[in-house]
Image (spheres, rainbow, N blue to C red):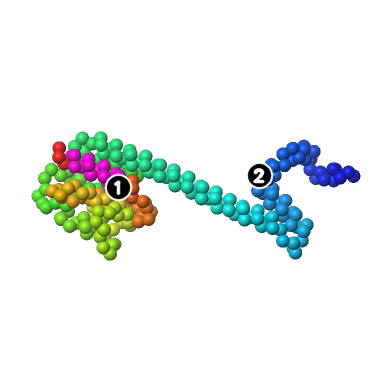
Amino acid sequence: MSTETSAGAGLSPELRDRLLADPGAILDDREVMRALLDAERAQQGENVIDIRARAMQALEDRLDRLETTHDGVIAAAFENQNGVAIIHRAVIGLLETVDLDDLVGSLQSDIAPILRIETLRLLIEAEPPMTRLPEDVHIAPPGAVDRIVAVGRRAPRGDDIVLRAASPITQPIHGRAVASEALLPLDLGARRPRALLLMGSADAGRFSPAHGTDLLRFFGQVLRLVLLARLRA
């Protein structure tokens, strides 16, 4: 039996010709390379340390970590892009309102579904009687915004956006059960009452202190400007 015949024993002529023509195909297949190295280690015995196999395993582990990181970056980028698109649609909805009644009414009926949340409520501090405010606006006494924002905090931090688990103090404002909430204080100016926008979600993980607030801040700034324009009308 020739050396060439023994070398090709167990392989079909077609497969052997393909491997000889393109040996790199084996290198590109991690499972095939692992099987080959395992077979070589079995022939060497347990007392022989195969540095190549260990190096290959380390490279495979590193590649797996890189692939996981890559997938995470892609998923985060897609989620961020999707979030930007949602906020843009919500902002367009705000700009399309024609007056104060339309603006306030659209928050819960139109804008909340766009944002994929259950509640979107506007609170304004005012002393009764307060005129010109739509029925859907929640009227609260002066100091209410500070008290609501400070719940669960050791000290209030001004006009920061708050992301947290839903609090019993805001339950009457939401008007329904929510699991997490976002609080967006709105500065309407020195001669106007303080305001607060409340977002409520049935998803406990929707609004978490670990999440970023850039998109919510942008939405709140647009709402503030639109609200001021509607109040002046």
Q: Is residue 61 above or below residue 19?
A: below
Label 2: few (<14), some (14–19) or many (≥20) C-alpha neighbours in 10 Å: few
Residue nearest the observer in this picture, 144 or 156 = 156
- Residue segment shown in magenta: 216-230
Please identify the quarter of the rendering in which residue 141 is found: bottom left
Q: Is residue 109 visible?
A: no
Q: Which mark is residue 128?
A: none
Q: Is residue 160 in view? A: yes
Residue drawn at (62%, 53%) of the image: 59
Q: CA distance from mark 1 to mark 2?
A: 48 Å
The x, y position of residue 162, in whole percent, is 30, 54
The answer to the question of whether label 1 and label 2 lie on touching residues, with beta carbons closer than 8 A, is no
Q: Residue at x 29, y 62 (%)?
A: 152
The answer to which image quadrant residue 21 occupies is top right
Residue at the disc numbered 2: 28
Residue at the spot x=15%, y=44% of the render? 133
Which amino acid is tagged 1?
Arg
Tell me which amino acid carries mark 2: Asp
Badge 2 marks a residue whose secondary structure is loop
Q: Is residue 66 magenta?
A: no
What percent of the width, then of the height, locates residue 66? Answer: 54, 50
Secondary structure beneath label 1 = helix
Q: Nearer the viewer, residue 165 or 183?
A: 183
Q: Residue furthest left?
A: 129
Q: Which residue is mark 1?
A: 217
Residue 155: give x, y in percent of width and height: 26, 63
Q: Is 229 in the magenta?
A: yes
